[in-house]
Image (spheres, rainbow, N blue to C red):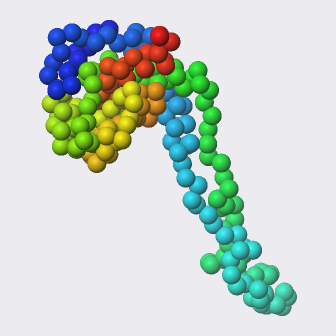
């Protein structure tokens, strides 16, 4: 599978890059697997911040609101009962919940290959000779991405995400730079354009396609 390639200056290259069919040509698509990988990524990045207090942790409520018998009302031992306003929360989050999910390596890599295949079929994949960020300047990086038609939400996959690439892209709205072997289904499916350097393309083929 051949695809148009751009030089490091943003002009069209004379030779087209070839996409590995084992990585970018996977059919049919298992949408259930893609959903599982997508949800797993979100679940494993979820922060466990919600905490509520039980009736034993809410302050006050030590005095019995009224005597046990003779009032005609229901018996209560504390105003911090969960059914009272200001009471504790029954069965609420404690901050100890584990929301993480597991997905085996084989399934995860297959899901990534399918996501890349969908991106290639949709014309979202752009190959660039190399993504150079001299002095880590933001303006040249933004101009280069615009020149090659990478707009909207851009996922940039390079062979090695160094400090210069990080500095040049971290403040660009909608642009996320990653190491090629750190790709995930969430980023690929949410990207409007997937820009891959030629060395990054080789790293992906070695990682997912088994080529050396």
User: x, y (%) of residue 23?
Assistant: 43, 15
Q: Is residue 200 above or below residue 1?
A: below
Q: Residue furthest right?
A: 69
User: x, y (%) of residue 58?
Assistant: 68, 77
Q: Which one is in front, 83 or 39?
A: 39
In the picture, the quarter occupied by the N terminus is top left
Q: Is residue 161 above or below residue 11?
A: below
Q: Is residue 6 above or below residue 143?
A: above
Classify residue 103 as left or right of residue 116. right
Q: Residue at x 55, y 37 (%)?
A: 40
Which quarter of the picture shows residue 187?
top left
Which quarter of the picture shows residue 142?
top left
Q: Which one is in front, 178 or 191?
A: 178
User: x, y (%) of residue 165?
Assistant: 32, 38
Which quarter of the picture shows residue 149?
top left
Q: Residue at x 47, y 16 (%)?
A: 206
């Amino acid at each position: 599978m051949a695809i148009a390639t751009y030089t490091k200056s943003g002009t069209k290259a004379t030779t087209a890059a070839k996409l590995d069919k084992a990585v970018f040509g996977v059919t049919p698509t298992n949408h259930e697997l893609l959903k599982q990988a997508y949800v797993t990524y979100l679940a494993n990045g979820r922060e466990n911040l919600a905490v509520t207090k039980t009736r034993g942790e809410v302050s006050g409520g030590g005095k019995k609101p009224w005597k046990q018998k003779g009032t005609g009302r229901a018996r209560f031992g504390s105003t911090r009962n969960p059914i009272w306003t200001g009471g504790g929360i029954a069965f609420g989050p404690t901050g100890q919940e584990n929301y993480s999910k597991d997905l085996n390596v084989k399934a995860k890599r297959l899901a990534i290959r399918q996501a890349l295949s969908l991106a290639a079929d949709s014309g979202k994949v752009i190959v660039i000779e190399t993504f150079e960020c001299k002095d880590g300047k933001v303006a040249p990086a933004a101009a280069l991405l615009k020149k090659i038609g990478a707009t909207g939400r851009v996922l940039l996959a390079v062979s090695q995400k160094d400090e210069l690439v990080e500095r040049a892209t971290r403040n660009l709205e909608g642009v996320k730079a990653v190491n090629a072997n750190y790709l995930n289904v969430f980023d690929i499916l949410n990207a409007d354009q997937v820009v891959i350097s030629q060395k990054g393309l080789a790293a992906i083929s070695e990682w997912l396609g088994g080529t050396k």
